[in-house]
Image (cartoon, rainbow, N blue to C red):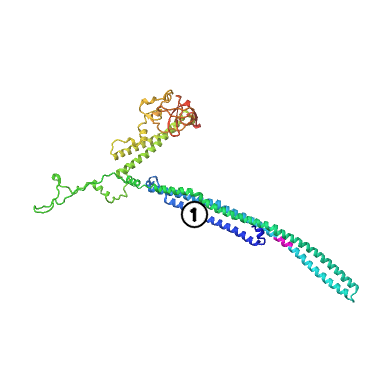
């Protein structure tokens, strides 16, 4: 069914219907806009909620309990969920609302064009009808005038008293009126034929085509609404997998809650290390009373050795100090925190001292790295004076050395306190491996694997059938003073031309086409010191690799 044939006379109703269709489309677009605003507000509120319950914390305040960690994992998943709601709002705004508004403007322009064509066709048909109607009315007037002339002529022609001139005049008038009526008749017939033709074309060609265009436009509008309905749902459907992962993450976080682990953390956090107090002795204040032999009283036990207990000193100070374990701990809000943490229980003191030692060891490692970098730079300046003055680095090197000595002193002091807590006299070497190497091996010798040793026999370990890397690279006076156990700066990179087994100590295994970092150039002994991306270091034959040095390392 087409509008052009079925609704040929419903121009005004089609005008109203197409306007209603555009209004409905814009109403749906308004609905989508309000929906995406709700999504945006929802996402914003979720993010604010996550931010409120996940504030910034210092490193010491990081949660350790599984329940807290799971809760923060849930907050992270909720934050991701809020991000997906923002994605929904963004895609609704772009793929649905924006598309609807653009299409609405196109529909308005197209509808206006079709209605204007319909009105123009109607106006042209009305104009043709007016021309036909005017010619009809003129033909009617001319016929009436001709009838009057005919009656007048017949009356004068039958009147015996009428003169011949009057009869001729009436006859001439009748002829003119008849001729004028004939012309009006021909004009009316032509206008009528023209109008009928235009009317047929209007209702069989022009109006059906215009109405068909309006019908196509309205059907496209309906199809567009269906597509946007689907897009509206697809936007939600696309985020469902990610939202499901967020929910699965929340479930996983919930399963990660471990009550036994949390209980163990409580013990670890608050364990004091004290022994439980012993039994309190009985204090007999009635021994100074005189008693008769007939007194039927229960005798109290006597102290061994016949020594009377001193009521003032019967309870030890240690026991009094530990009474708070069973009651309320004495308040000491103004008590300062001591440097050796002696104000803490033994177990907590041990943990704090260990944490401080680890932190100091990291700072010491940084200073060692800085010292090595300065020494390398000084060595480059000495070999290439045009690049800089070596003496300009000496104040910084001295300052770094001073900082290292201070840090080592602090580490030694804290280790002494730690040994005191643990009931040991000597410093525990396994508590600071990096500090021990830097503090006790500073006068060692450098071995091919980049470490230091006091064993002279390890100075000349070389791979079989390869040149000795120690012959052309003996440690100088500066290397004797400081260790070289810290990562060296990268001077360039190389590509392995052949495979090398690296079975001997100090050498580095490499495969063909493997890329390594150069950290020490060949000193003329046929060996180059390299480092893998994994951090492993050692010497490789210079003839086995293709070397590319950095520009700022040339000539070093």
Quadrant housing residue 146: bottom right
Q: Residue at x 58, y 58 (%)?
A: 24
Q: Secondary structure at mark 1?
A: helix
Using the image, determine if residue 10 lies above or below residue 383: below
Q: Residue at x 50, y 55 (%)?
A: 38
Residue that numbered label 1 is attached to: 41
Specify the principal SS of the magenta part.
helix
Q: Residue at x 38, y 37 (%)?
A: 364
Instruction: Magenta stretch: give its range.
Output: 122-128
Q: Can you say which quadrant of the picture contains the N terminus?
A: bottom right
Quadrant housing residue 154: bottom right
**Residue that lies at the very extreme toward the right in this rendered image:** 164
Q: Nearer the viewer, residue 86 or 282?
A: 86
Give the x, y percent position of residue 282: 18, 49
Is 336 left or right of 94, judged from the image as shown? left
Q: Is residue 477 part of the magenta span, yes or no?
A: no
Q: Nearer the viewer, residue 151 or 92?
A: 151
**Residue that lies at the very extreme toward the front in this rendered image:** 1
Residue 141 visible to an observer of this rendering: yes
Give the x, y percent position of residue 531: 44, 32
User: How many C-alpha atoms fall within 10 Å of the one at disc 1: few (<14), some, or many (≥20)?
Assistant: some
Is 245 left or right of 95, judged from the image as shown? left
């Amino acid at each position: 069914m087409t509008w052009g044939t079925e609704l040929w006379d419903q121009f005004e109703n089609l005008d109203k219907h197409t306007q209603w269709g555009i209004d409905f489309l814009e109403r749906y677009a308004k609905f989508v806009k309000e929906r995406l605003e709700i999504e945006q507000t929802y996402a914003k509120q979720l993010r604010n909620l996550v931010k409120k319950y996940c504030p910034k914390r210092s490193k010491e305040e990081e949660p350790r309990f599984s329940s807290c960690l799971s809760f923060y994992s849930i907050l992270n998943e909720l934050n991701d969920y809020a991000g997906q709601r923002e994605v929904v709002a963004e895609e609704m705004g772009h793929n649905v609302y924006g598309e609807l508004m653009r299409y609405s403007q196109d529909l308005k322009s197209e509808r206006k064009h079709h209605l204007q064509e319909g009105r123009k066709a109607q106006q042209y048909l009305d104009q043709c009808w007016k021309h036909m109607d005017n010619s009809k009315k003129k033909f009617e007037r001319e016929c009436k005038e001709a009838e009057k002339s005919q009656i007048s002529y017949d009356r004068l022609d039958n009147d015996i008293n009428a003169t011949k001139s009057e009869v001729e005049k009436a006859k001439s008038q009748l002829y003119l009126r008849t001729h004028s009526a004939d012309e009006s008749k021909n004009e009316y017939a032509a206008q009528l034929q023209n109008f009928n033709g235009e009317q047929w074309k209007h209702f069989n060609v022009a109006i059906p085509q215009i109405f068909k265009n309006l019908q196509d436009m309205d059907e496209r509008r309906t199809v567009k609404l269906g597509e946007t309905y689907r897009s509206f749902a697809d936007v939600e459907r696309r985020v469902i997998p990610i939202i499901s992962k967020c929910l699965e993450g929340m479930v996983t976080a919930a399963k990660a809650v471990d009550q036994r682990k949390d209980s163990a953390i409580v013990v670890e956090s608050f364990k004091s290390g004290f022994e439980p107090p012993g039994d309190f002795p009985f204090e007999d204040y009635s021994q100074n009373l005189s008693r008769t032999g007939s007194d039927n009283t229960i005798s109290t036990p006597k102290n061994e050795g016949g020594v009377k207990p001193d009521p003032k000193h019967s309870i030890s100070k240690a026991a009094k100090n530990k009474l708070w374990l069973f009651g309320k701990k004495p308040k000491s809000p103004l008590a300062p925190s001591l440097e050796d943490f002696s104000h803490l229980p033994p177990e907590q003191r041990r943990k704090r001292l260990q944490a401080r030692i680890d932190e100091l060891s990291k700072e010491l490692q940084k200073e060692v790295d800085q010292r090595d970098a300065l020494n390398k730079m000084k060595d480059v300046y000495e070999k290439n004076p045009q690049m800089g003055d070596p003496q300009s680095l000496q104040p910084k090197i001295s300052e770094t050395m001073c900082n290292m000595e201070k840090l080592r002193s602090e580490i030694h002091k804290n280790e002494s306190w730690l040994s005191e807590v643990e009931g040991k006299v000597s410093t525990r070497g396994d508590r600071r491996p990096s500090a021990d190497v830097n503090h006790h091996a500073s006068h060692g010798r450098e071995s091919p694997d980049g470490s230091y040793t006091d064993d002279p026999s390890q100075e000349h370990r070389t791979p079989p059938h390869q040149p000795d890397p120690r012959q052309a690279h003996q440690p100088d006076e500066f290397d004797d003073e400081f260790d070289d156990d810290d990562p060296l700066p990268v001077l360039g990179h190389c590509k392995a031309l052949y495979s090398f087994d690296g079975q001997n100590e100090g050498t580095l295994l490499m495969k063909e086409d493997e890329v390594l970092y150069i950290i020490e150039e060949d000193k003329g002994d046929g060996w180059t010191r390299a480092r893998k991306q994994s951090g492993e270091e050692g010497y490789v034959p210079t003839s086995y690799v293709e070397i590319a040095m950095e520009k700022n390392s040339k000539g070093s």
